[in-house]
Image (cartoon, rainbow, N blue to C red):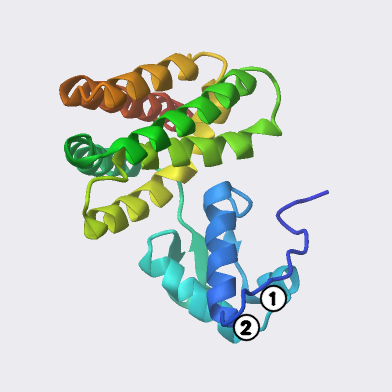
């Protein structure tokens, strides 16, 4: 079954407009790769897939273009933004700078509740890290959620809503790239050990070591996918 063409009727939450629902679902599908990089997003086809009219879809696509997940191609309509090595390197530079600043702030300000959140998120992720090294593709989606929750937990006590918002935008962009990197190279990385070391350094309040480990962790992901994208070119 072609998942790209499978029907995915919108299910708006209470109080949510059709535009909001279309934006949310399309954003989720783009980040998850259901709508692959460079796919032409034809309104008529999307209307059939998501069971929604053209007006909410156009408005949703315009919002996604503002998020840089979609490219508006003038008279040709819209397309999913491609995956490009230079773009990911730039994204990783920005993401790392913000992440490390937030991590230091969280280590300084975090209380016992924050510390417990980090430990719990690390425990859940550790179990899934081991599973994705096998050929268990069904675990990848669950791993993605756990990975996101772990890294968010480490910085969640930073005390700045603006930094958290900017971080969220950058991580949504990076998620598309990281998913490809993890799926391609998950047999070659000991993600469980990488995450365990980060969690230990954070809980021990060792900001210098935690920052170094996170920077290296992000850089490995970037290096792997840049090699893959360059090889594809």
Task: Classify 10 Å Cα crowding around label 1: few (below 14), some (14-19), many (20 and above).
Answer: some
Query: Could you tell me residue 209's position as x and y percent?
Result: 21, 19
**Badge 2 or badge 1: first in the primary sequence:** 1
Disc 2 to disc 1, C-alpha distance: 6 Å
| Residue at position x 69%, y 71% in the image | 11
* Mark 2 element type: helix
Task: Classify 10 Å Cα crowding around label 2: few (below 14), some (14-19), many (20 and above).
Answer: some
Q: Is residue 161 left or right of residue 45?
A: left
73 shown above or below 83: below
The image quadrant of residue 71 is: bottom left
* Residue 85 visible, this angle: no
Disc 2 and disc 1 in contact, CB within 8 angstroms: yes
Which quarter of the figure is the C terminus placed in?
A: top left
Disc number placed over residue 54 in the picture, else none: 2
* Residue 206 visible, this angle: yes
Query: Could you tell me residue 172's position as x and y percent?
Result: 42, 51
| Residue at position x 19%, y 41% in the image | 109
Query: Could you tell me residue 107's position as x and y percent?
Result: 21, 34
Residues 22 and 11: in front is 11
| Residue at position x 34%, y 33% in the image | 115
Disc number placed over residue 47 in the picture, else none: 1
**Which residue occupies the extreme right position in the image?**
1
């Amino acid at each position: 079954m072609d998942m790209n063409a499978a029907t995915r009727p919108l299910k708006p939450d209470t109080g949510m407009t059709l535009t909001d629902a279309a934006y949310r679902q399309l954003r989720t599908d783009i980040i998850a790769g259901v709508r692959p990089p460079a796919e032409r997003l034809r309104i008529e086809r999307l209307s059939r897939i998501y069971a929604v009219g053209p007006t909410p879809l156009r408005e949703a696509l315009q919002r996604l273009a503002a998020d840089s997940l979609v490219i508006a191609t003038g008279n040709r309509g819209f397309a999913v933004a491609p995956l490009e090595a230079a773009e990911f390197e730039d994204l990783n530079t920005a993401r790392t700078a913000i992440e490390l600043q937030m991590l230091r702030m969280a280590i300084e300000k975090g209380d016992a509740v924050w510390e417990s959140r980090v430990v719990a998120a690390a425990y859940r992720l550790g179990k899934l890290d081991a599973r994705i090294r096998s050929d268990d593709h069904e675990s990848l989606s669950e791993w993605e959620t756990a990975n996101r929750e772990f890294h968010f937990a480490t910085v969640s006590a930073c005390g700045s809503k603006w930094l958290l918002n900017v971080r969220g935008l950058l991580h949504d962009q990076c998620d598309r790239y990281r998913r490809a990197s993890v799926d391609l190279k998950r047999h070659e990385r000991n993600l469980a050990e990488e995450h365990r070391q980060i969690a230990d350094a954070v809980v021990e309040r060792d900001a210098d070591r935690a920052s170094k480990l996170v920077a290296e962790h992000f850089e490995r992901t970037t290096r792997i996918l840049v090699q893959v994208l360059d090889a594809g070119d």
